[in-house]
């Protein structure tokens, strides 16, 4: 005679132990914007230092320096907005949107500064 297997009792995790997740459109993008915008702020500071070291026309150097300083501030604002978005879930959607807009604007300024720097080197 074969032994019949006894039915196993259900092993369910009670719903009490589950943590509800707040889901929103675009949730989690702040986790990517925060480190990237902080890095880009450092890149702006580095570009300012490099531009100060190279010999360029005074006017072009001042324009690039000012543009990169403003760009660093834009990335810094994006960094703060994404940090607030992570720390305050009830405000995350709004701050995430602002962080994203500032980040994209900072990238646009970075490209503009890169073009200005490249055209300045082209004169030599």
Image (tube, grey):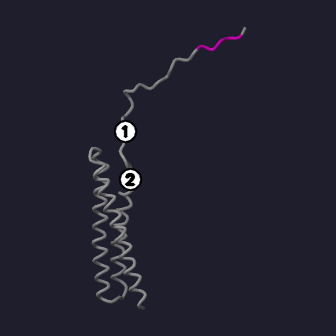
Q: Secondary structure at mark 1?
A: loop
In the rendered view of the protein, which quadrant contains the C terminus? bottom left
**Could you tell me which residue is drawn at 29 percent across and 87 percent down?**
59
**Could you tell me which residue is drawn at 39 percent across and 31 percent down?**
18
Read off the residue under disc 2: 29
Predominant SS along the magenta part: loop
Q: State whether residue 52 is above or below residue 75.
A: below
Q: Where are the magenta residues, as a range?
A: 2-6
Residue neighbourhood size for the residue with mark 1, other residues' Cα within 10 Å, grouped as few (<14), some (14–19), many (≥20): few
Q: State whether residue 13 is above or below residue 100.
A: above
Read off the residue under disc 1: 21
**Residue furthest toward the top?**
1
Residue neighbourhood size for the residue with mark 2, other residues' Cα within 10 Å, grouped as few (<14), some (14–19), many (≥20): some
**Could you tell me which residue is drawn at 60 percent across and 13 percent down?**
6
Reading the chain from its start, which is encountered first: label 1 or label 2?
1
Locate residue 111, reporting x and y percent.
39, 73
Q: Secondary structure at mark 2?
A: loop
Asked whether 43 or 64 is in front, the reply is 64
> 28 left or right of 98?
right
Q: State whether residue 121 is above or below residue 99.
A: below
Q: CA distance from mark 1 to mark 2?
A: 16 Å
Q: State whether residue 82 is above or below residue 117.
A: above
Locate residue 62, reporting x and y percent.
28, 83
Please check the rendered image and state whether residue 71 is part of the magenta-colored stretch, yes or no.
no
- Say which mark, if any, is on residue 85: none
In the rendered view of the protein, which quadrant contains the N terminus? top right
Locate residue 69, reporting x and y percent.
28, 73
**Could you tell me which residue is drawn at 40 percent across and 84 percent down?**
119
Locate residue 25, reporting x and y percent.
37, 47
């Amino acid at each position: 005679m074969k032994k019949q297997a006894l039915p196993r009792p259900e092993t369910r995790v009670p719903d009490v132990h589950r943590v509800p997740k707040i889901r929103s459109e675009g949730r989690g993008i702040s986790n990517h914007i925060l480190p990237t915008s902080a890095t880009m702020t450092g890149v702006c500071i580095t570009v300012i230092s490099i531009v100060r070291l190279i010999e360029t026309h005074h006017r072009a150097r001042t324009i690039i320096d000012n543009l990169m300083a403003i760009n660093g501030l834009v990335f810094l604002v994006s960094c703060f907005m994404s940090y607030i978005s992570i720390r305050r879930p009830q405000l995350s959607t709004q701050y995430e949107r602002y962080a994203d807009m500032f980040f994209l604007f900072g990238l646009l300024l970075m490209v503009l500064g890169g073009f200005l720097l490249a055209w300045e080197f082209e004169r030599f």
